[in-house]
Amino acid sequence: MIYLDNGATSFPKPHIVHDAYANCMRYYAANAGRGAHRMSIMAAEKMWETRQAIARLFGIKNPERIVFTHNCTAGINMGLCGTLHSGDDLVITNMEHNSVYRPAMALSKKGIRTLFASADKEGVITPDAVRRELTPRTKMVLMQHASNVGGGINPIREIGAMLRKKGVLFMIDAAQTAGCVPIDVVKDNIDILAFSGHKGLLGPQGTGGLYVRDGLFIEPVFSGGTGSESESPFQPDFLPDRLESGTQNLPGIAGLGGGVRYVMEKGVTNIGAHERMLCAYFADQIKTIEGIRILGPANMERRVGVLSVAMDTPEPVVVAQKMDEAYGIAVRAGLHCAPLAAKTLGVLEGGSIRFSPGPFNTIQDMDYAARAFREIMQKK
Amino acid sequence: MLIGVQSMTAALNLKKKLADENIRAQVVQKPKGLQKKGCGYAVRVEKENLEAVRTAANALGIKITGVYEAG
């Protein structure tokens, strides 16, 4: 199997992730922060090490401001629901994944209005597009760092700087960029950062996280046991405990720590460049196929390693099925859980087929996939 | 000495900082009598390191919930 579905979740994982996960399960999978015996302390130390590694990766000064979640979507929901109140305005974009769109729509039933910043023709959001949607009631702008459909990277540093001056909270969905595009929460003016652990950070599924800027208070969506201030009927007021109720996914977090260390050793920029190079090569190989349209920025330097292709016939889902059955290539087709992006890019009816290589894919993989794609398209 | 902090995470943060300064610290659960009730964690250090612990906690923004002679 040639796996080109890293936009959904990365595969394979580095050996360091397998080992970290398995070692935790074998030797120290106690409950972190729920006792002080040696195994519990070791479990808590492993969680701390992962927090530290993530902090280094994203330029976060205090690792205690990082909360573990079970995926990026959970973090987005926590950031939204814990911050906004009836009467607030929220700005998102017309390129968002359902992980942003649906929670925003759910909040609209609670008196929180959502406004949509419009992307340019390549699916990229400019600072002006965001500025146009701001109102005196805008509490937060929440947007993706890069699109899981078009692949375009948004200029978050410029947008964040503009919002910081206006006192508007800036929350980023880094599902497609954590691990392959540099992120610095201070320089990028990010107040809240939601990230996936199982995509670019190469951790196990069921991992993710949320960074909350120092001084920003978020109401917890979940309440429960934290192993601290147990005598109180209310959640602690400090992080990470305030937002980490119940037993945490320790094996996953240990594995995530391995993934983050791997990413840092290889270099975020290097990984991103590798994935872009593979996409550029693939795009070059398929560009002469009749009846296809490559979505997103033409300039590969403005993209992450996600290349979606639209066509009328055969349907993208049929092409994806043939890629799997006849060639052993794993790709995804459809709307990619992003109907807003599909509509913006003009593919809401038919969707698109997405090729998303990861750090372990090679030029040979892309060559084979391009030949397979061409053969399928020519047999239509 | 036992230096009480708010959480296990804070205790580990403090312990790592102290380790960087070659001060040995151990994370322990606060024994009954050193807290009102419920769960709580502390860092056990030699008495001579108390000021270093205060300085480290201050630098990290960690709230010290109590200092105990016991332990």
Image (tube, rainbow, N blue to C red):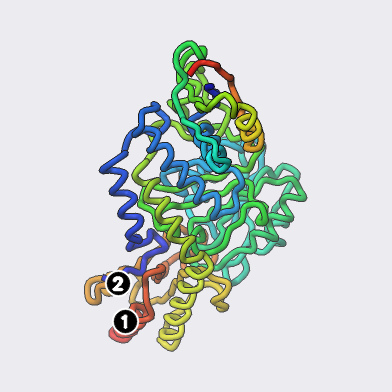
User: Which residue is drawn at the image coordinates 40% and 76% (left, top)?
Assistant: A312
Earlier-in-chain disc, 2 versus 1: 2
Residue B7, given in percent of the width and then of the height, sits at 51, 29
Q: In the image, what residue type sits under mark 2?
A: Ile
The answer to whether the residue labelled 2 contacts the one labelled 1, judged by CB atoms less than 8 Å apart, is yes
Among all residues in the image, which is located at the extreme bottom?
A288
Dot 1: few (<14), some (14–19), or many (≥20) neighbours within 10 Å? some
Q: In this view, does A124 lie to the left or right of A291?
A: right
**Looking at the picture, do discs 2 and 1 lie on one chain?**
yes
Please give the label number shown on residue A2: 2
| Vertical comparison of A333 with A75: above or below | below
Along the viewing direction, whichever of A279 and A320 lies nearer the viewer: A279
User: Which residue is drawn at the image coordinates 34% and 60% (left, top)?
Assistant: A13
User: Which residue is drawn at the image coordinates 37% and 61% (left, top)?
Assistant: A10
Residue A366, given in percent of the width and then of the height, sits at 37, 79
Chain letter belonging to callout 1: A
Chain letter belonging to callout 2: A
At mark 1, the secondary structure is helix
Q: Quadrant of residue A31?
A: top left
| Vertical comparison of A174 with A24: above or below | below
Residue A109 visible in the shown view = no
| Vertical comparison of A200 with A134: above or below | below
Quarter containing the C terminus of chain A: bottom left
At mark 2, the secondary structure is strand
Residue under numbered circle 1:
A368
Residue A273, given in percent of the width and then of the height, sits at 51, 73
Residue A39 visible in the shown view = yes
Q: In this view, does A168 lie to the left or right of A280?
A: right
Q: In the image, what residue type sits under mark 1?
A: Tyr
Q: In which quarter of the image is residue A290?
A: bottom left
